[in-house]
Amino acid sequence: MTFKLAQRFTVSIGMAGALASAMLFMAPAHAQDSSPMSLSDRVARLEQQSQGQNQTRMAQVNQLQQMQSQMQQMQGQIEELQHQLQQLQDQSKAQYTDLDSRVGRLEKGGAPANPASAANGPAPSSTTPVSTAPGAPAAGPAPATPPPAPTVPAESAADKAGATTSYNAAFKSLKAGDYVASSRGFREFIQKYPNDSLTPNAFYWLGESYYATTNYQVAVEAFNHLLSQYPQSDKAPDALLKLGYSQLQMKQTDAGTATLKSVIAKYPSSNAAKLAQERLTRLSQQPAH
């Protein structure tokens, strides 16, 4: 019995020694085999991380370029809105100044008519003793002709007042952003008062109303009519500028560029020329498609 136990113990010790020897031999082999694989895995992971970072950076660059492009477009829109606001303010001031000056001229023109008739009234009484002179009766009818003259300006003044009221109503709709109502109002004004001094301005604001609603083709017609029929109008530089804007909006790049250059050539010292140059600069900075 004791011999068998000793024999088993010896076998167990031998097996434990063999197992330990095997582990000793396998451990270095495993270490030698796993080290190169771990290094290659690390290199592969680093390459993947590098590629991912490059892709992220490229995406960020693209987003930055898109944001810059959007900012440039927004800047152009802000400049256009500022230009329109300045035009509205200038137009409003000029409109009321012109109206005040006209009312003043009408008042001054009407005042002398009464003194003239009053002066002509006493004249016959002072010449009553000279009843035989043929010149006295002639002096009577002569003063009678001036009184009808002021009645003609009175009628034209009434027409002018109606034209001003119609124009102001359309302009009020434009300032309120109701471009449909403003375009309708300016069309009616032009049809009813084609020879009024405000008609060139009405054509310009009609074009602005169409431009604001992206009806660029109709806006071009309004601006072209102003430029062809009223080339000396104060609105001519702005109309030519907006004509170029409209052509660009319709993808007529060559025509729009040529129009903006003509603004600079024809009206070099105007604010329209400055805006035209800024728009041309932005166009030159845009990438070619």
Image (cartoon, rainbow, N blue to C red):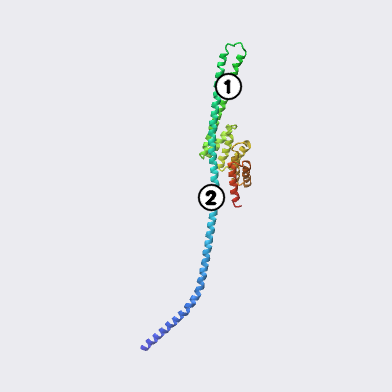
- The answer to whether residue 1 shows anywhere in this view is no
Q: How dense is the environment of label 2, judged by Cα within 10 Å: few (below 14), some, or many (20 and up)?
A: few
Position above or below: 148 against 203: above
**Image x and y of residue 271, in percent:** 58, 42
- Say which residue appears at 53% left-offset and 43% top-offset: 82
Q: CA distance from mark 1 to mark 2?
A: 64 Å
Amino acid beneath label 2: Met
Q: Which residue is mark 1?
A: 148
Q: Which residue is mark 2?
A: 71
Position above or below: 5 against 180: below
Between discs 1 and 2, the one toward the N terminus: 2
- The answer to whether residue 272 shows anywhere in this view is yes
**Residue toward you, 160 or 11:** 160
Position above or below: 271 against 120: below
- Say which residue appears at 54% left-offset and 24% top-offset: 111
Q: How dense is the environment of label 1, judged by Cα within 10 Å: few (below 14), some, or many (20 and up)?
A: few
- Say which residue appears at 53% left-offset and 50% top-offset: 71
- Say which residue appears at 54% left-offset and 33% top-offset: 97
* Cβ–Cβ under 8 Å for marks 1 and 2: no
**Image x and y of residue 176, in percent:** 50, 39
**Image x and y of residue 232, in percent:** 62, 36
**Residue toward you, 269 or 166:** 269
Q: Quadrant of residue 6?
A: bottom left
Amino acid beneath label 1: Pro
The local secondary structure at tag 1 comes to: helix
Q: Quadrant of residue 212?
A: top right
**Image x and y of residue 135, in percent:** 62, 14
In the picture, the disc for residue 229 is none
The local secondary structure at tag 2 comes to: helix
In the picture, measured across the screen, residue 46 lies left or right of residue 259, that is left
